[in-house]
Amino acid sequence: MNDDLRNRFANLYPDIKRLARTRLAQAGGVTGLNATALVHEGFMRIAEREGLHGETRLQFFAYIGKVLRSVVIDFIRERDADKRGSGVTLLTLSSADETPAAWLEVTNLIDLDRALDQLRDFDERLYQIVEMHVFSGLTCAEVGSELGLNERTINRDLQKARALLAEALDRPELSA
Amino acid sequence: MKSAFGISKELWPKASSLFDELSELDGPSRESKLRSMRSREPELVDAVEKLLARTRAQPEASAQFNRRTARDSRVDEHSFDAMLRDALSEPGEQYLAGDRFGAWTLIEPLGRGGMGEVWRARRSDGLFEGEAAIKLLRTDLPAERLAARFARERSVLARLNHPNIARLLDAGVGGRDGKQAFLVLELVEGTPFERFLQDHQADTRRRVALVRDIAKAVAYAHAQLVLHRDIKPSNVLVDQDGSIKLLDFGIAAEIGDEAEAQSSSALTQLTGRGLTLEYAAPEQVIGEATSTASDTYSLGALLYFALSGAHPFAEMPNRAALNRAVLEEPPTRVRQRVSDRLQTNARRGNAAYAFEPVDVDDDLDAIVAKSLRKRSQDRYPSAQSFVSDLDAWLLHEPISIRADDRAYRWRLWFSRNRAFAAASALAGIALLGGVIASVVQRNEAIAQADAADRARAEALRNEKRATTALADLAQQVNKTEAASRRALDAQNAAELAKQRAEEALAAETRAASATRAALSRAERERTIAEAQTRRAESERRLSDSTSRFVTGLFEAADPERALGEKLSALAVLEAGSKTLEAEATTDPRVAAAIGTTLGRVFNHLSRPDRAIPLLERALALAVAQHGEQSKQALDARYEYARALERKERFTEAVPLYRSLIALPADAPLDIKRRVFSRMELAFSLGKLGKFEEAEAAQRELEQAVEPLPKDDWLRVEAVASRAVLASMRGQWQETFRLYSSLGDRINQPPPGHARDSLLMRFGFATSSLATSNPEAAAALFPPLHAESERLLGPDANETLQFLWHVGFTQRNAWDLSGCIATYDRAYAGRARTSGSTHALTLDAGLWAATCRAYAGEKRAATDVLQRFMPALLSIADSGRSDMRNLLTASMLALQLEKFDEAETLIGALQAAISKLNLGQTVEAVRSDLLGVLLIHGKHQDIARTQAALDAMISKRQNTPTGNLVRSNFEVFSTQAQLAALRGDCELLRTHASAARAALLRRSGSKHEHLAKLDQSSAHCKPRDGGLTPAALGVL
């Protein structure tokens, strides 16, 4: 991501957070909707408003994934200040209706954060898919259409990414 | 080198595609593939195997999850999604006592809700003593946009100054990051509405009175053009004295996102966009434009809640069902709800409910149902009308809508049972009647028939009302914004008519004694009503885009009379132009469009003085926004020219018309305006006395319409234009001939030209008056006036102009009581539409006074003259109408022997004539003559008077008005009277017979002065100087 784009996204940071909070607050007690899907529509509007297209648009959604991830990490850090890393977090790695959901058990989100950074170096596309799907709430089909790939490919890539991340999180040298 | 993922980055692309390939294979094929590759690439195979193993091995917790689907409604507390939800639900910022927002400092938290936190706060700079409530809003609008919006709306909201509305003290964006939106509200110590109802065993009347007070506050705000948009129990507090406070006025709109209205996906519908679905009107739920009727809906829901302890759709199990019900289901009637709840309470021992419901009678039930209608136009049109019905209920008076409610219910029944209703209509009333008659009591049948008759009469009345409203509509020629409200009225009336007709039909269906003829009559009425509804509907759609602005105008102009009664158009327009001037922030394109329209309407109302500044600004805006040659700018220029022309600023209007005519053919100015520009140019030039140039413009006009078919209306207009030019030159024969040549075509205007047709008939009538039998001509005016009254409305400029001529012919026919009544009526109309000092108002008043003077009511006439004097003399830039008023007033003053006033007035008159360069007109001749009569009145010196008269005649001898002087009745008559005074009977008879002929030509045989002349001639004795100056006032 070049500096211009980074600056541009950084300017959107408060918007993204505010939007996410507000949407959730407005939804009140509505169940049956996941939080990411709920805020997702608002992000689509920001993307329209900012006139984001093509690659920039992809990076924007990946960026949102990062923002929401950091929101959660900050939250957990604060909540679990005294028992760092004791919680277990499950990531849904597929939400396509016809395929069984794949979950990734994460005991330490901060480790996950680092693993994701490494994944970006390792396979940029997989990283993007994970950010867009897991953290910014795009469905497999939407990720597919953003990237010009079919849903089946996205699902397989998500399985691959899950395997890679599970591998990384299991390796003791990671935290070194 | 291996990475964190157990495989090197170099090897990964290969591993990745192998992974893909293997996931397509079943277990055994996968095994054999891996075996075959292991020897060649052991590292790759190892890594991929490991990864595949990881995809198969599900952690225990996730295996459990897999038994449900990923979209299971219960999201596990450990999932990332749930964590995100928790993280986002935490307050974003932690506010602390002492934090400052603008000039406000937080003291202590008061509560937290979906919208954000509320704190007790104090103003830090000491400008405001005491405490306030500060709301720290959650909103997804960016801070800059919010700040701009607050700046725009703060003043409007702060203007709400009502004892039952919590005041907005401040609003802005601030806090530690400078981006937190906040609102500062009057701190209200009170009990929330719901708690109040729980704690106090209020009876029905008390509850209705509370809701009435809330509605009154809402009506007040509507008059200030502010909608609440989020009326619900939690926004109402009741203080210790039991009076209510309504919170959060207009705030819902401020913090909502305008883009939201466009995106109404399933998701937004499901989440309800933060709305309180229980109290929101259907149009709010689907994100359509809200109006005062949306607030009226919420008030109805609030009343429902207050009476029954439940909201209208309380039985809906979840939000999605509620959402659908608000849009589609009629709510359970509140009366039904109350009785349901009382029964359940008895069963369950009262545990489940917030508070006890109270008795609800039919009227209250109808009021609630009316306000909860799905379509906003079926509800109370304003909060004020809702208040009126609640007041009526509290006073045990009849409410406005019982019949309406019955009709509505019947209509629902009708639409549900359409097939049955249609079948029974087909089968014929006799058959059905026979069946029913056997089960229906005879007296009930009679009652039904009566009801049918009443309903039919009502339908007829409403139809008439609709017709009138539609005629009013036609008056606002180009579908102005003002038409929108009238269209709504027309539609409402037509709707009502339709309901009545349907009711009539239903009653008849049930009534044994009803006949087939009655049925078909009702059917016919229904068809008419429906056609009118359709017409009204299309009118309404045309102006719908601005209807919100307009609704606001009417509410602002007169909130008390918003229930379909006619508002003064002028009041509405004044309110409109003030709003336009005051709101500098209005989008300049909208300001240009509305300014042009308001200007056009002011033109129609003969208020060019108000039109000119509006149009000047609109023209400048249109040029700046759209360009000099844009349609908007050209339309504004055309209207501006018309305003100048109507203000008689012809020299300025002429170049504008010329520029419009000179436009290239592809310029965006429609053909009608092109043609009319030529016509108006000819007219303006004629008024300037430039007859040759006017003639040239007229010829161009005729050429322009030449290619059109013979019976095209524009060709009729062109002929009429020539006739008008002829009349300006005093060529009455030619004028009469031209109008006559149009024959019956005058009476067949295409839609939209009824007014033009009336004006031509008027031209024909005036030219008849000048050329043929004046008594026959006089008979043309009363029907013209009546038709104009029907078509254009009683206060339309044209109607009043025709009325003036009715008075004129009455004056000539010496029908003085008729003349007084007519001009009084014209005066009232002018005063209503144009104000009491407008030239045309003064004119009507002066003629009424003149007729009074003739009729001997000198005291009354003198009062009027003296009352009008300041207005008559204060005209700074006088036009022709002002000059004519001076003329009339001078004559009146002479008639009343008020010579000082007469002298002042005649002086002003002569100044006006020379300033307007009218020295060679009939008015100038009259003015000269008045000077002569004044000399006579003041000095009583016959010789001096005669000398002045002779001087005047000789002065005009060789001028264009010489002929006028030689054939003028007033001149002859004055000559005759002077001869009488001198006792020169021979000369008297000569002049008298000339005067007689002139007067007969002009006024017919009934004019009293004829008798007077005859009398003078008969009784003339040589040297008999007995006539008073008053006898000279024969003008």
Image (cartoon, coloured by chain):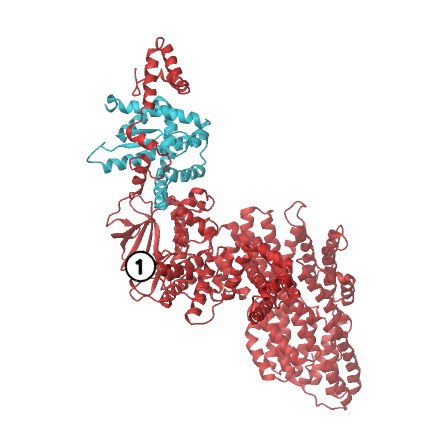
Chain colours: A cyan, B red
Q: Residue at x 36, y 11 (%)?
A: B35
Label 1 crowd bin: few (<14), some (14–19), many (20+), radius 10 Å: some
Picture quadrant of residue B820: bottom right
Position of A141 relative to B85 (above/below)? above
- What amino acid is at disc 1? Asn
Q: Could you tell whether B689 is left or right of B465 in the image?
A: right
Picture quadrant of residue B839: bottom right
Identity of the residue furthest to the front in this view: B438
Q: Residue at x 62, y 81 (%)?
A: B852
Foreground residue among A1 and A62: A62
Identity of the residue furthest to the top in this view: B39
Q: Position of residue A68 (x, y in %)?
A: 33, 35
Q: Could you tell whether B235 is left or right of B1007 in the image?
A: left
Foreground residue among B401 and B72: B72
Q: Chain of mark 1?
A: B
Q: Which residue is mark 1?
A: B350
Q: Position of residue B889 (x, y in %)?
A: 62, 76
Q: Could you tell whether B982 is left or right of B530 in the image?
A: right
Picture quadrant of residue B809: bottom right
Identity of the residue furthest to the left in this view: A82
Foreground residue among A95 and B756: A95
Q: Position of residue B513 (x, y in %)?
A: 62, 68
Residue B467 showing in the rendered view? no
Q: Could you tell whether B378 is left or right of B909 in the image?
A: left
Foreground residue among B219 and B954: B219
Position of B896 relative to B759 (above/below)? below
Q: Secondary structure at mark 1?
A: loop
